[in-house]
Image (spheres, rainbow, N blue to C red):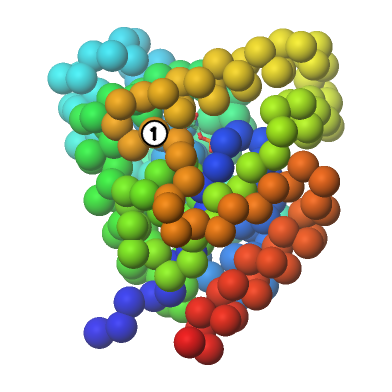
Amino acid sequence: MTRPLIVAIDGPAGAGKSTVSKILARRLDFTLVDTGAIYRCVALEARRQGIALDDDARLEGLLGKLTVSFHVEGEINRVFIEGEDVSEAIRTPEISLAASSVSSRPVVRNHLLEVQRRLALSATHGAILEGRDIGTVVFPDADVKVFLFANPEIRAHRRFEELFQKGTEKPIDQVLDEQNRRDKEDSQREVAPLKPAADAVQIDSTELPLSEVVQQIEDLVQSRRRA
Ligand code: DC
């Protein structure tokens, strides 16, 4: 049986992974797996159940019962825990930091490894996975690997705009501070830290319009299909 084509898009927060992945998934008719959203669901449930973010035994219990699913609605990739739509609840700044914390626990990463692989391998045509360790750990043999990055100031600026659009005004310095904390936690953790795979194509989106980034990745996918 042939495996669906796997596209790994890794990089730090705010580099444009989500926007680019969504557009690409639609254009190519691929399944989109937002792996950060899965870590966010674990963090949200831990908070709701009063579980400390370093309590491995209770986190393991939670993971055994957690069912996360996705449903694309137009421009929005909705996220559900059981039947509950948690798309907004998982995007608060508090849950962003909590997700970064739970993602450093090996018990969480090991469990989610299989969840992510299963979601991708059940795709009909192909799957785009966006995250931090897709090309290094989840699918080291992905067909296309991209590491998307941008300078910290422009990433914080994009996040500031996104929050502003949603009606939240937060000083840009604070956005940058929280982003730096998360970048540091994500890239310095012992298990599966954020880093480009040796064979990833690195794309700097600092001065590149996202439409151009999408085009570059689509070209990589098409040339892989032809190969
Ligand atoms: O992409 P995001 O900001 O929604 O991810 C939330 C957190 O989850 C992020 O701080 C790091 C973690 N994460 C991870 O460790 N590995 C992934 N593949 C995806 C996300």
**Residue farthest to the bottom, as pictured:** 226
Residue depicted at 23% across the width and 40% down the height: 111
Q: Relative to 63, does residue 9 appear above or below in the rendering?
A: below
Whether residue 214 sits left or right of residue 61 in the image: it is: right
Whether residue 129 sits left or right of residue 117 in the image: it is: right
Between 9 and 84, the one lying in front of the other is 9
The answer to whether residue 18 of the structure is visible from this angle is no
- In the rendering, at what x and y percent does residue 68 appear? 39, 44
Q: Relative to 170, does residue 7 appear above or below in the rendering?
A: below
Residue depicted at 71% across the width and 17% down the height: 175
Q: Quadrant of residue 171?
A: top right
- In the rendering, at what x and y percent does residue 57 appear? 16, 20
Question: Regarding mark 1 in the picture, which secondary structure is present there?
Answer: loop
Marks counted in the figure total 1
Residue depicted at 31% across the width and 10% down the height: 52
Residue depicted at 23% across the width and 14% down the height: 55
Between 3 and 226, the one lying in front of the other is 226
- In the rendering, at what x and y percent does residue 47 appear? 40, 16
Q: Relative to 43, does residue 86 appear above or below in the rendering?
A: below
Instruction: Check disc 1 and report the residue beneath it.
Output: 193
Cβ of mark 1 under 8 Å from ligand 1: the answer is no
| Amino acid of disc 1 | Pro
The answer to whether residue 136 of the structure is visible from this angle is yes
Position of the N terminus by quadrant: bottom left
Q: Relative to 74, does residue 215 appear above or below in the rendering?
A: below
**Residue farthest to the front, as pictured:** 198
